[in-house]
Image (cartoon, rainbow, N blue to C red):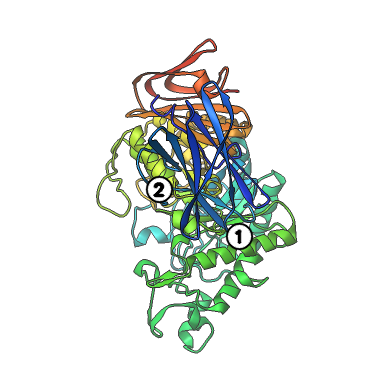
């Protein structure tokens, strides 16, 4: 296996411990080294600290360096010296040449995000399409003037103005009626896309943040849903647009009516009242201007602010997913993103301290390189499209027709597992470890093609994707309907109603795979907070270890046939392995207590554990 003898370090508890203003950093070096140094950047200057050898095990030598913590973020990498050869180890991997600071390991020193997050799983619900109050399927007889009523069996349109107005009539009471389905699946966080009144069914064009849309059942329905979820041991996460409002929002109407009003300072007017900046130029989504202190007070600063109000009181929310978090506070030369996200995170901690409990989650939507936005005490985690979703799509897709990449007119790129691993290592190198473990691994979302469509309807490939999202660092994220094999060609068409009344349309095998793999993740702490060590990658497979406190989990994922791979158990830091899960065409052979062999004759996975 090509990476099995590489030096290794990550941000997990096995490799990092913090106390009394210093960090102890441990690095595993197969074959040993003449010297190992930790290089830390202090005030722009690289400073080295020599690591001491602590112990050796089966040919791997462990070194430990003690370094001073820098304010907020300590970034570091290792120099491993053998004779005149220097190997640099950073978060992307090993390099035989000088590297920049960009992919350094980063340790955030500050109040930690909620400890429960890495062990949980998320189920995303688009309220209009999940479940109605009753079992009716006909188009809703009552609907607002902007809405186009649809039957529960209708297929949503693809991208376009029609899609945003199609009204299927799902409600929060409907969600509450179906919580047993989520419990049986084994998910623990119910994430609702926006629930505030709007003039679309996606509701990202909020008309107010002060109440829940009566079409969804109003405030009562949200509180009762939260109460029912909490009684089942689940949590409920809301969706907040800190970047913009709708053009019918009460703040925006007040802003347009009076150029001298406080609300006029909430937006980027270029020519009052009709000239203003919209999200990506969309006039129905006027962009918020966080140079306004009053806007900050109303969004998150005051006790009755939008962010705080819904996190407090009886049956409150347990966190926020922030829409287009990467654009919040940014407009041309203005960049307040880091400042605003830091203030939001601090405010949520204040709320948590007052209300008790174990913390609320702050999850940022981020489609691209999230690294620079996470190198401080701000967003707890991100929707990791760049470091998980797109690499997995690139590997497992079958070139489906009509599916486009990003915002282009071009098809999905296709590459092997080795390319996907390179992409994961490169993009995730920018994320501090604690951010990575508080981020989500989504195969599809309400903004994307369904994963089942990406893999061409192949249930085996779909199951490999599920195995990846439960075993790689990050929180598994299931878009409602993925667990039964629902399809959709883009982010609008994918928002199809859940077919409760058509069980024959469910892929029960995919449902069982989700249930089984999510349960396995709950049972194995190493899959929640354990480190990640890559062992091998080729055109059709990727193999890695997750480890925590002496427990090692071996994961092998394949998209098709490949030749045998072999490794000594000693190189995996185990004396034996037990196969915990196997699916599809992946095969494993254990040769006593000496070696393990892995192969595949089709898409599949192997998950084994040892110590």
Q: Residue furthest front?
A: 83
Q: Which residue is mark 2?
A: 386
452 on left or right of 578: left
Q: Residue furthest left?
A: 410
Which structural element holds mark 2?
A: helix
Quarter-of-image position of residue 608: top right
Identify the mark at residue 217; answer none if there is no mark. Answer: 1
Q: x and y percent of residue 437 in the render?
A: 55, 44
Q: Residues within 10 Å of mark 1 (few under 14, many from 20)?
A: some
Which structural element holds mark 1?
A: loop
Q: 75 and 159: which one is in front?
A: 75
- Residue found at x 57% / y 27%: 552
Q: x and y percent of residue 308 in the render?
A: 64, 65
Q: Is residue 170 visible?
A: no
Count of labels shown? Answer: 2
Of the numbered discs 1 and 2, the one sitting upstream in the chain is 1
Q: x and y percent of residue 63 in the render?
A: 55, 35
97 on left or right of 175: left
Q: x and y percent of residue 312 in the render?
A: 69, 62
Q: Residues within 10 Å of mark 2 (few under 14, many from 20)?
A: some
Quarter-of-image position of residue 411: top left
Quarter of the picture holding the C terminus: top right
């Amino acid at each position: 296996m090509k990476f099995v003898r590489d030096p290794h370090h990550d941000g997990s508890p096995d490799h990092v411990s913090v106390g009394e203003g210093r960090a102890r950093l441990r690095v595993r070096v197969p074959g040993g080294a003449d010297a190992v140094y930790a290089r830390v950047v202090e005030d722009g200057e690289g400073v080295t600290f020599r690591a001491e050898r602590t112990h050796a095990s089966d040919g791997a030598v462990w070194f430990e360096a003690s370094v001073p913590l820098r304010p907020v973020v300590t970034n570091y990498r290792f120099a491993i010296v053998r004779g005149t050869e220097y190997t640099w180890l950073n978060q992307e991997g090993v390099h035989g040449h000088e590297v920049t600071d960009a992919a350094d390991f980063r340790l955030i020193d500050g109040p930690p995000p909620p400890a429960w997050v890495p062990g949980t799983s998320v189920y995303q619900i688009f309220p209009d399409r999940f479940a109605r109050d009753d079992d009716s399927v006909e188009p809703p007889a009552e609907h607002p003037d902007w809405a186009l009523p649809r039957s529960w069996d209708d297929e949503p349109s693809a991208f376009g103005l029609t899609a945003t107005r199609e009204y299927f009539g799902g409600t929060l009471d409907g969600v509450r009626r179906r919580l047993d389905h989520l419990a049986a699946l084994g998910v623990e966080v119910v994430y609702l896309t926006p629930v505030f009144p709007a003039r679309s069914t996606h509701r990202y064009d909020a008309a107010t943040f002060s109440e829940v849309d009566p079409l969804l059942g109003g405030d009562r329905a949200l509180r009762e849903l939260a109460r029912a979820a909490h009684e089942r041991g689940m949590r409920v996460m809301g969706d907040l647009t800190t970047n913009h409002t709708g053009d019918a929002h009460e703040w925006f109407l007040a802003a347009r009516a009076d150029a001298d009003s406080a609300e006029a300072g909430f937006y980027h007017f270029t020519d009052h009242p009709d000239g203003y900046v919209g999200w990506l130029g969309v006039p129905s989504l006027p962009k918020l201007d966080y140079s306004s202190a009053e806007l900050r007070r109303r969004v998150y600063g005051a006790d009755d602010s939008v962010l705080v109000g819904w996190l407090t009181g009886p049956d409150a929310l347990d966190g926020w997913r922030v829409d287009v978090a990467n654009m919040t506070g940014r407009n041309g030369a203005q960049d307040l993103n880091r400042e605003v996200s830091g203030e939001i995170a601090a405010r949520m901690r204040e709320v948590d301290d007052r209300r008790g409990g174990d913390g609320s989650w702050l999850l940022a939507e981020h489609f691209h390189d999230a690294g620079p936005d996470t190198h401080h005490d701000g967003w707890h985690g991100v929707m990791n499209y760049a470091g998980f979703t797109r690499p997995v799509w690139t590997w497992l897709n079958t070139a489906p027709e009509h599916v486009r990449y990003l915002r282009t007119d071009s098809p999905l790129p296709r590459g092997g597992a080795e390319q996907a691993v390179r992409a994961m290592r490169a993009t995730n190198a920018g994320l501090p470890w604690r951010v990575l473990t508080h981020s989500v691994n989504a195969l599809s979302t309400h903004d994307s093609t369904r994963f089942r469509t990406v893999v061409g309807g192949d249930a085996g490939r779909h199951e490999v994707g599920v195995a990846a999202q439960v075993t790689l660092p990050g929180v598994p994220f299931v878009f409602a309907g993925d667990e039964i094999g629902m399809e959709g060609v883009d982010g609008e068409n994918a928002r199809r109603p859940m077919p409760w009344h058509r069980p024959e349309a469910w892929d029960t095998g995919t449902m069982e795979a989700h249930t089984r793999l999510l349960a396995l993740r709950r049972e194995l702490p190493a899959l929640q907070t354990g480190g990640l060590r890559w062992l091998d990658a080729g055109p059709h497979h990727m193999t890695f270890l997750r480890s925590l406190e002496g427990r090692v989990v071996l994961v092998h994922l394949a998209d098709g046939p490949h030749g045998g791979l072999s490794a000594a158990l000693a190189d995996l830091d185990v004396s034996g392995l037990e196969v915990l899960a196997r699916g599809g065409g992946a095969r494993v052979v254990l040769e006593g207590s000496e070696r393990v062999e892995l192969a595949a004759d089709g898409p599949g996975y192997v998950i084994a554990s040892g110590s």
